Amino acid sequence: HTHPHGTAVCLYTTMHSEALMNVAPKKSTTALKASLAANAVLVAAVGYMATSSSNLQSGISAKTSTPSMVQNAMRSVASLSSKKISMEQGRAILSASPKADLLVKTGAITNKLMKQGMSMDQIAQQVTCQKIGGAACNQEWYGPDRALWLGPFSEGAVPSYLTGEFPGDYGWDTQGLSADPTTFAAYRETEVIHARWAMLGTLGCLTPELLSKYSGVPIAEPVWFKAGSQIFAEGGLDYLGNPSLVHAQSILAILACQVVLMGGAEAYRVNGGPAGEGLDAINPGGAFDPLGLADDPDTFAELKVKEIKNGRLAMFSMLGYYVQAIATGKGPVENWAEHIADPSGVNGLTGAIATKFTP
């Protein structure tokens, strides 16, 4: 059976099949056109089934119990490969198609790849990998062969709905938080946003204290959990001790600015706008990617893994900052310096677990 999008999928499959071969297919003879058309239909059907979901662009799994897009492509190949198309049927397909030459070309590429030792499963997987941004091809971080949370003991411990399609998926969900696809999408978005804030926050907590302690920058209050109180002091708060940068004197003015700027940015991110129509709600792209981080699909897939791994570490570090502040009443740099000076005498085991900080 053919599909209205078959021509477009054939074109897509042809381009990426050529990329796999890195060779130009030779012209087929008339006697081979029918068999090539059969292969073209098969590849087109696989490509369409693997890539036609509207959820592909948003990165959200369509159903909890369904396998990944690569696995869907594999099953499609298995169901279609057993079907035989006669010479007459092949000629009928070619004559009915406005892109007969494209079908022949696609079939020729498919035949050549199969003669080189690639199975239809492998061809379908490679086409699907190209479409979803290289993620499915990076087996170290994505797919069924990715690293899992229990390592070699992970067999039977990974839920069926965690297929490795998304960055940072190590197959750990003992509480079933990702079982519902809508909830899973919301949690993933929330995690990425919190991870980015945590990376900025940890850097913001360390920088003033480092500058004050080791560079002699005159910052009135470099400790992160005490810095905000300066706005209530006479003269207000100077960012990094420099009144020409930010000289905040009104908590209400700061609150109003944050509501307008942050609320506007968040509304634009969620709802889109003139420069953000059709863009991913959590990943860079279009006008919001001046560095071109998303230009190369394989690099982008790896960067998303790095971001979530560093972001999770930053969130855990920020929790440590909170606990240190409550237990010692000092900033992270000062705690670190005291520990380095006396590792055995100043650490989490020897320090009293009591609240020493009074707001």
Image: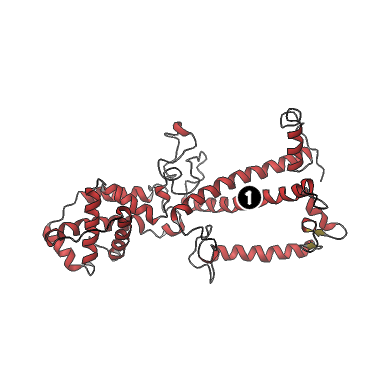
Residue count near mark 1 (Cα–Cα under 10 Å), binned few <14, some 14–19, many ≥20: some
In the orientation shown, which residue stands out farthest toward the bottom?
A: 274
The x and y percentages for residue 67 are 37, 47
Give the x, y percent position of residue 139. 41, 44
Judging from the image, what secondary structure is the residue with disc 1 in?
helix
Residue 300 as seen in the image, left or right of residue 6: right
Coloration of the structure image: secondary structure
Asked if 4 appears above or below 227 in the picture, the reply is below
> Along the horizontal axis of the image, is 81 left or right of 212?
left
Q: Which residue is mark 1?
A: 199
Q: Residue at x 34, y 51 (%)?
A: 126
Q: In the picture, residue 103 is in which quadrant?
A: bottom left
Q: Is residue 43 above or below residue 160?
A: below
Q: Residue at the far right: name it.
A: 234
In the image, residue 279 lies at what x, y percent? 49, 63
Q: Is residue 325 visible?
A: no
Identify which residue is drawn at 42% across, 47% down: 138
Q: Quadrant of the N terminus?
A: bottom left
Three-letter code for the amino acid on which mark 1 is drawn: Met
| Residue 166 screen position, x and y as percent | 47, 49
Q: Nearer the viewer, residue 31 or 267?
A: 31
